[in-house]
Amino acid sequence: LSWCHPKYGNYLASCSSDNTIKIWKIQPPLLFDCVYTFTKHTDIVTKCEFAPYQYGAILLATGLDDNISIHSLDLYTNQWTGEIHKKIHNKGVVSFSWAPALPPLNFQFDFGDQNDNSNIQTSYLPMRIVTCGGDGIIKIITIRSKEQICIEQEISAYCQSGPIDISWLNYVGYTENCIALCCSDKTVKILNSEDGNSFELSSVIQLDEDCSKVSWSNNGTYLGVTLRNNKVKIFHESIDNQWEELEKINKNNEEILGYQNSQEG
């Protein structure tokens, strides 16, 4: 499921193992009216998610038929239309994630006159996604329009064990792009890029259990990993660029604080 940004209307998108994508318009008090059905996928639709609202009312979906589909709302007619793009991956498109619309924050530029905001960058980045497929390949894709996409980069060296889920960091205060990749070998791999195009492996988080999903917090500080043993682990990057489990960090802090309190007592 994925909610559309409310500025475009009260829409909810769903995808299913019946190979369809549906968009529902919510009518008060709680009536779900199906206003759009897309049936051009030929296998299970694995994920659907609306784009960052800055780009408009745009929905993207991936399927095990190796394809992705892009859907958009015409604000004049209130009609949804979709296009399918074939053979993005082999062995199915497992998951995808939208890149943020805004560029990473750079603390180095000169703010100048605080009353003059003309020198602060407000333009949006090109619309991009990162996908992972059953073929073990990660792809950075630029979406130029609903009908035209361009594969910018393919990465195959870091997910040969089989990708499960992928998430692009929603940076706030970060100066580079970051992607988390959840793999079937009980690892989460962190890929970084300064320019947003050339991603390289920077860290590997080793887990004790199989994982099924990765998700960044809204401000990009914490990484959540869903495990198949009904647990969720939260990780945080330390000053020396090591990913630490939040539970262990809190435990260490409690021990330090407890020691300090006993000394003060």
Image (spheres, rainbow, N blue to C red):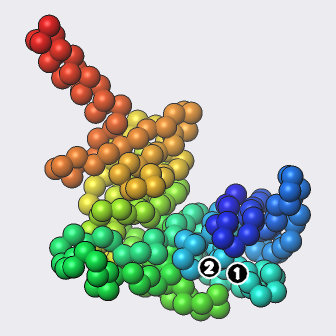
Question: Measuring 54% from the left and 67% from the top, which residue is drawn there?
Answer: 96
Is residue 44 depicted above or below 110 in this figure? above
Residue placed most toward the observer, 113 or 140 = 113
Q: Circle 2 is placed at which residue position?
A: 56
Residue placed most toward the observer, 229 or 36 = 36
Question: Measuring 12% from the left and 12% from the top, which residue is drawn there?
Answer: 264
Residue 130 relative to residue 12: left or right: left
Q: In which quarter of the image is residue 124?
A: bottom left
Is residue 252 depicted above or below 158 in this figure? above
Q: Point out residue 32 in the picture as x, y percentages from the top left corner.
A: 86, 58
Choose mark 2 or mark 1, whichever is in front: 2
Q: Circle 1 is placed at which residue position?
A: 72
Q: Can the viewer see residue 64 in this picture? A: no
Residue 109 relative to residue 65: left or right: left
The single residue placed furthest to the top in the displayed view is: 265
Q: In which quarter of the image is residue 197?
A: bottom left
Label 2 neighbourhood size at 10 Å, few (<14), some (14-19), many (20+)?
some
